[in-house]
Image: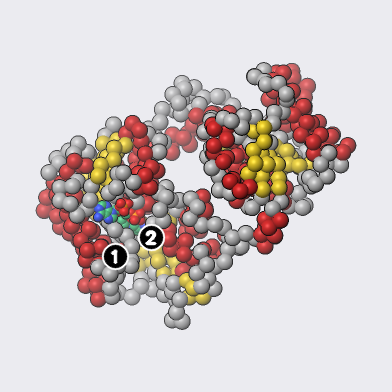
Amino acid sequence: MSTVAVTGASGFIASCLVKCLLERGYNVKASVRYPNDPKKTHHLLALDGAKERLKLIKADLLEEGSFDSLVDGCVGVFHTASPFFFDTKDPQADLLDPALKGTLNILNSVAKTPSIKRVVLTSSEAAVSFNGTPLNEQTFVDETWWSDADYCRKNQLWYLVSKTIAEEAAWKFAKEKGIDLVTINPAAVLGPLLQPSLNTSCANIHNLISGAETFPNATYGFVNVKDVIDAHILAFETPSANGRYLMVERTAHHSEVVNILRELYPNFKLPEKASDDKPYAPTYNVSKKRAEELGVKFTPLKESIRQTVESLKENNHFKAPKKKKEAERASVMATVAVTGGSGFIASWIIKFLLQRGYAVKASVRYPDDPKKTHHLLALDGAKERLKLIKADLLEEGFNFGQKDLLEPAVKGTLNVLGSVAKTPSVKRVVLTSSEAAVCFTRTPRTPQVVIDETWFSDPDFCRENKLWYPLSKTLAESAAWEFAKEKGIDLITINPTMVIGPMLQPSLNTSSAAVLSMINGAETYADVSVGWVNVKDVANAHILAFENTKASGRYLMVERVAHFAEVVKMLRNLYPNFKTPEK
Ligand SMILES: NC(=O)c1ccc[n+]([C@@H]2O[C@H](COP(=O)([O-])OP(=O)(O)OC[C@H]3O[C@@H](n4cnc5c(N)ncnc54)[C@H](OP(=O)(O)O)[C@@H]3O)[C@@H](O)[C@H]2O)c1
């Protein structure tokens, strides 16, 4: 597999690029400034494939020859390293020198390395649109535009100067030395962060949701990081790619960004007014033609903003404000219990409950096994509000087989409900049932049939067909409804289908194993259609079912049904280098 180099690998864009290159099967040599700082390297070394195919190499933009060993043996170079911030007292030393000298430094190393077929430079829209021509609704910026470094200097737009002079110098040097250069020119890049530190473009969104009184009276172009990475890789892999590629999904004034945030997160405190009383900076048009011809599909701005906020929350850069009701509830610290806390779905339910301020008592079978508890104890708020309690659905252990599924499911459910019946403080029980307790009846499942919550799997049908897991879920759910009715327990069931998505727990659960079975070298895939749903949606359904006073009955959770052949196709599109079964 070919080897490529990435500079500035610890950064926001480069981290995603390294991830994607590894996923595509490349060997990656990546330069970092601080190889001994885990904050700069841990997220890279933890990437899939990193152990075998990622090599970190120390290099600094300003150290001449520093990149020789990086580019040695590579067929391609992605040069992303360049300082990106606005506040500086010494723009020459902080921004201009590293950008310009760094770029020439790397291109010098490239010029000495004949194995390199192409260099993809991460330039910026900052090097395109800013030359004094008014930017407004009538303006149409394309790749023929260039920012004017002198104009930017006069206006002290130092980052813009740095990107403009670096790109200009790169084109000149590439022409002189016959280097095949392509530049990617993104606007403000948003989306999920892989690195633990907050980068400048995501900090822009972070500022807006962190209690700022005003929003900047400024219009920016925006683009999603995934699309920017696609552009880099397409620019490298498509032989006919050439020149510059602007990457701007669209421009938007910060007032609109705030409106999108308000729509997505009605409980956030967001700034109400602009930073000055001047008319709003107008939006302008930026060509997507070349990027789209290259094969880029742009993610809408609203989705990029959502992904950024969700990632800021997940990486603990930002604590979401609580709704008034939630805040009240948190202040009295309502306590809820979750059984089977170590599991795939329960781990997510516990994470979300802690995020919402609940105190959680969670049962686990093996409280002394760190593989079953460490990921729970490491959750935010766990120290103060999570209590693990040893409990087993049955007193004796169980393995696999008919008896081993049925008894824990049915007796365990009744066991838990028996405890609930003795505890008047419990307001509601949310039971994780399954689509398996819904759809296995004698009615054939065809594309014309719509399954809903009125369906109930038929235990005899399950028995006849040796469908032991569906039988266990069906018997457990019917026993639960019967018992709840008898004892006046407010019961709700969530009936998810095959649940997939990120795993919090270190062990592989059965539904995630179904996905693994299609990428671990198997020759065939299962000839069956099943329903699929995301684990976060399932965890949220549990919490909504608990909190929403109007919730009742059963809730099917199936995003849609797909044959394994279709899932294999999706995997192939996402990961063209994976070996997936052909039949
Ligand atoms: N994010 C955007 O909105 C956006 C838009 C258009 C273009 N870009 C361009 O995309 C590239 C990456 O930006 P980003 O958003 O990913 O920013 P970032 O997270 O701040 O990454 C910048 C990278 O450059 C490295 N770097 C800075 N000074 C260096 C030096 N003297 N020697 C070696 N490495 C140095 C940093 O290393 P450390 O981690 O060691 O600090 C970091 O890895 C930059 O060229 C930027 O101009 C970004």
How would you rate the neighbour count of disc 2 (Cα within 10 Å): few for under 14, some for 14-19, many for 20 or more?
some
Say left or right for 257 vs 475.
Answer: left
Tell me the quadrant of ligand 1.
bottom left
Residue at the far bottom: name it.
277
Residue drawn at x 17%, y 43% as measured from the top left: 68
Say left or right for 11 vs 356.
Answer: left
Q: Residue 392, which numbered label?
A: none
Residue drawn at x 25%, y 63% as measured from the top left: 94
Which residue is more in the foreground, 16 or 350?
350
Residue at the far right: name it.
486
Q: Relative to 178, does residue 101 appear above or below in the rendering? A: below
Q: How is this picture coloured?
A: secondary structure
Name the amino acid, label 2. Thr
Name the amino acid, label 1. Tyr
Residue drawn at x 56%, y 24% as measured from the top left: 527
Residue drawn at x 49%, y 22% as measured from the top left: 524
Q: Where's the N terminus, which quadrant?
A: top left
Q: Relative to 14, does residue 503 appear above or below in the rendering? A: above
Q: For ligand 1, tell me if the residue under mark 2 lies within 8 Å.
A: yes
Residue 48 pos. (x, y %): 40, 35
How would you rate the neighbour count of disc 1 (Cα within 10 Å): few for under 14, some for 14-19, many for 20 or more?
many
- Residue 238 appears in the figure: no
Residue under label 2, please give it. 200
- Residue 305 appears in the figure: yes
Residue 208 pos. (x, y %): 49, 65
Say left or right for 132 vs 570.
Answer: left
